Amino acid sequence: MKTYFTPGPSALYYTVQDHLRTAYREQIAAISHRGEDFKNLYRDTQSNLQQLLGFSDDYAVIFLPSATEVWSMLISNCVAKKSSHIVNGAFSEKFYNTAKTMKVPTQLIEIDHGEGFQMSGINVDEDADLIAIVHNETSTGVSQPLEDIYQLSQASQHALLAIDGVSSIPHPDLDFEKIDCAYFSVQKCFGLPAGLGVCLVNRKCLEKAQVGAGERALAAHQSLPKMFELATRHQTVYTPNVLGIYLLNAVCKDMLMKGIDQIRRETEYKAAVLYQTLSSHSLLQPFVKQPEYRSKTVVVGEMENSKRLIEYLSSKSMVVGSGYGQFSNDHFRIANFPTHSKEHVEQLADFIAAFE
């Protein structure tokens, strides 16, 4: 049986098989999203997410088909004048390109892929309504330190600060008093089938959306004020992925039982094992050169013709991800999510160390 270390979709959380059986037995996929059973499920999921991540009652939990849909939602609802984009990888660039496609004035603050930002060199335009930054670049394995990210909110009191935590949440201990929006997908760190995005937005986002972002907000199919209002009643604008929400709730409960601090400690340990293995290998090395910017949840290595390593690991029933985009030939990406046990990561590291 293969073990999937691909950075999303990835290996299912180890309890999901049992939860799927329970969902089938209880006919979860058949319940009405307008009924009381779904409202209770929404309420319970919100409560467990709140306990796990630590956000306040000021936030609404909004369910979407994917995290990428957050980009157009934020642009259409919360940007009247300009959005500012901190770009150092493919996914931060995609958010920027979404804004450009929607014909929104944008500020591009960009450095080379694989590098982290020095906050002292970032000057956000005064008329920016939104600052978009990726905490963990899935494409390159760069993770921006949280304290650096928080400086952006201090630099611009007017702009909303939105964090892409698609491939890192729940690992980072986010201070939700210092950000306005965080979003993620369930097929990565939560170890679930793809098809559900989760967006956490505070009332500052709602207030900006209520003021209006011009004609874009009127034309958009996603109304943040409507979604926020329905979320307070534990409902959605359109038919949601009820099974996905059920599984997310179940895994949140499992993670709470294990303890988020334990999950974070294990993630740090496993990342250290993988980076040490890459750094000591004669043919391989971490792509991100500065240790303080290395992701703990998506470990990216580089070598010439990485396909050879990927095929070797596959022959050992260990499936890792290929490089993303322009790095497809020379990178490999290893997911280090909560479902990946210390034993599996240590075994993977042993195979990598033996690669010639």
Image (cartoon, helix red, strand yellow):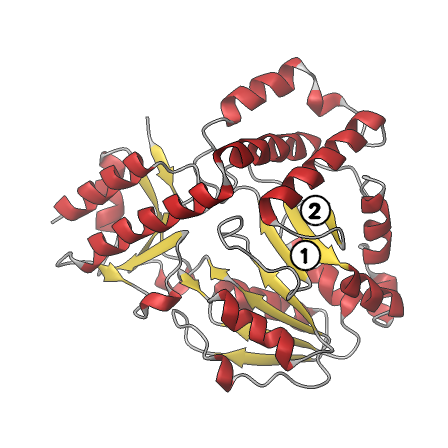
- Residue 86 is situated, as x and y percent measured from the top left of the image, at 55, 74
Residue at point 21% right, 49% down? 308
Q: Quadrant of residue 6?
A: top left
Tag 1: Cα neighbours inside 10 Å, few (<14), some, or many (≥20)? many
Asked whether 293 or 288 is in front, the reply is 293
Give the number of the disc on residue 335: none
The amino acid type, in three-letter code, at marker 2 is: Leu
Instruction: Judge left or right: residue 338 versus residue 92.
Output: left
SS at mark 1 in the image: helix
Give whichever of discs 1 and 2 has the lower sequence position.
2
Q: Which residue is mark 1?
A: 70
Residue at point 67% right, 44% down? 65
Residue at point 70% right, 22% down? 28
In this rendering, is residue 136 above or below 106?
above
Residue at point 61% right, 40% down? 195
SS at mark 2 in the image: strand
Q: From the image, which quarter does the N terminus lie in?
A: top left
- Label 1 close to label 2 by CB (< 8 Å): yes
- Residue 202 is situated, as x and y percent measured from the top left of the image, at 74, 59
Q: Which residue is mark 2?
A: 64
The amino acid type, in three-letter code, at marker 1 is: Val
Asked whether 182 or 24 is in front, the reply is 182
- Residue 47 is situated, as x and y percent measured from the top left of the image, at 70, 39
